[in-house]
Image: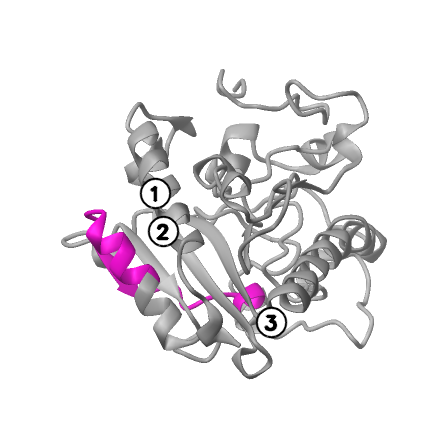
Amino acid sequence: MHPPMDMPLDIAGTPAGSGSGAAEAPYLLSRPERQTVPLVFASPHSGRVYPPSFVAAARLDPLALRRSEDSFVEELFAAAPAHGAPLLAATFPRVFCDVNREPWELDPGMFDGPLPSFVNTASPRVCAGLGTIARVVATGEAVYRRKLSFAEAEERIRRYWQPYHAALAALIAETRSRFGCCLLVDCHSMPTHPVQAASPPDVVLGDAHGTACAPRATRLMEEALQDLGYRVRRNDPYAGGYVTRHYGRPREGVHALQIEIARTLYMDEARIERLPRMAALRRDLTRLVEILAGTDWSFLR
């Protein structure tokens, strides 16, 4: 099966429209001319540069691999820099290395030898096959045709996971230093959830049940989205992953809020293609960014 026509990457590893060295960059950072708001936007799961060695090792075709992506999310929030906030986006796919996990959440059954003692082999994510290096895609199909070596996992974590988090941590620290606080908006998309088929939300906000973000900030985001006409739910079924829980430290003036956008609002989930209505969603999310940029966030300090 061939990749869909709008797949914005060369499967050999070079993003469309980029220079020959772009595939080496684990993330893209779009900064405003001057940061004017204590906001940082991040898209950890929208990357779609697939290293050729990974594609060769996978038993799935490129389209099946892409179903784990939060496709096009960085495009939905592309207005952030124009409103004074940086936008960080991973370029590599989550099925290759998931930055919304601890750095060493690994399934021992995936590897051809014993793992170091510091590896977390028993987390719920690992047990589900969705550790830092995923065993399965979102649909439950196994990713690899062979066992991996620990060296392969270590190389991905050091070359992709660590640089992404170094950049994110630096943005948060810089923002907090400048404004006295920081609100990290961790941007994701969500597939249709069978449990919610009768009344699916358009957006789920995750603040780790109030521990990662000031309730007032979550409420402001919720009300802004509702005013734009969206059905919003909190923490169900997504309360926030590693990023939200690790960086969200309200007592230190750092707040993290995960936002999950329903994929049915903007894309064909089977073909991984943008739908015409994506333009309307992007306009609404640009308006959301504008509202957030115009908010007085001093209460987060």
Q: Which residues are magenta?
A: 221-244
Q: Is residue 105 left or right of residue 219?
A: right
135, above or below 60, in the image: below
Label total for image: 3
How many angstroms separate mark 2 from mark 3 (CA)? 20 Å
203, above or below 114, in the image: above
Residue at the bottom extreme of this rendering: 251
Which is more toward the observer, 296 or 251? Answer: 296
**Residue 213 in view of the camera:** no
How many angstroms separate mark 1 from mark 3 (CA)? 25 Å
Determine which residue is flagged by label 1: 287
Q: Residue at x 43, y 38 (%)?
A: 76
- Judged from the image, the secondary structure of the residue bearing numbered disc 1 is helix
- Judged from the image, the secondary structure of the residue bearing numbered disc 2 is helix
- Judged from the image, the secondary structure of the residue bearing numbered disc 3 is loop
Residue 291 circle label: 2
Determine which residue is flagged by label 3: 180
Kind of residue at badge 1: Arg
11, above or below 121, in the image: above
Image position, residue 147 (x, y; %): 73, 50
Kind of residue at badge 3: Gly
| Residues packed near mark 2 inside 10 Å, few (<14), some (14 to 19) or many (20 plus) | some
Q: Earlier in the sequence, mark 1 or mark 3?
A: 3
Contact, mark 2 vs mark 3 (Cβ under 8 Å): no
Q: Is residue 293 left or right of residue 50?
A: left
